[in-house]
Image: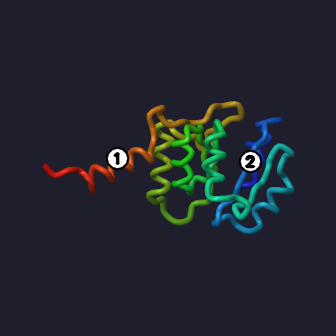
Amino acid sequence: KMVEQVTAIAQSAGECPCVLTTSRRTPSNFLSLLQREAPANLEMVPVEDTGPTWVAERLEESSFAWISEDSVSMTYEALTAGCQVGLLETPMRGAPGRVVRGAAALQRDGWVTSFSDWRPGQELGRAPEDFNEANRCAKAILERWFRSES
């Protein structure tokens, strides 16, 4: 299913280059399966070939990002970078938990678009202009642990 989704997205981009990277949790056979179907505009970069700043740098250069829906931290990193975000659907194991509920809330608020709701040429969801999760967290830490006691 993931191969089909990635292929459809890359094909819809036409000549526009697309870059895909894996994660430590990606099954070892995924890239070989994808290579059989991948269009020429899809560059595949295994996580082992990336450095500590590689993903952040790519997100800063990108107008949109597709992320597997089970990767919460990557979803928020892409939203913080200002990308339009699409969620690749992954098989659900067990009852829906906080990750599924969180992704559903982001979809409901229009911040992300699920693959099944997306159509080629359609803009993806995006966080509000003032969204910056890193700043919000830093402010919360400063207020909680470093506020001056008067």
Percent x, y for residue 24?
Answer: 64, 66
For this orientation, the residue located farthest to the left is 150
Q: Which residue is mark 1?
A: 139
Quarter where residue 90 is shown: bottom right
Q: Residue at x 58, y 40 (%)?
A: 113
Q: Nearer the viewer, mark 2 or mark 1?
A: 1
Q: Is residue 110 above or below residue 147?
A: above
Percent x, y for residue 23?
Answer: 65, 61
Q: Residue at x 44, y 34 (%)?
A: 130
Q: Residue at x 70, y 58 (%)?
A: 50
User: Do callouts 2 and 1 mark residues in contact (Cβ within 8 Å)?
Assistant: no
- Say how the picture is coloured: rainbow
Label 1 sits on what residue type?
Answer: Lys
Q: Closest to the observer: 27 or 80? A: 80
Quarter where residue 25 is shown: bottom right
Task: Please tell me which of labels 2 and 1 falls first in the chain.
Answer: 2
Relative placement, left or right, of 117 versus 10 is left
Q: Which residue is mark 2?
A: 19
Q: Is residue 93 above or below residue 105?
A: below
Percent x, y for residue 84?
Answer: 59, 37
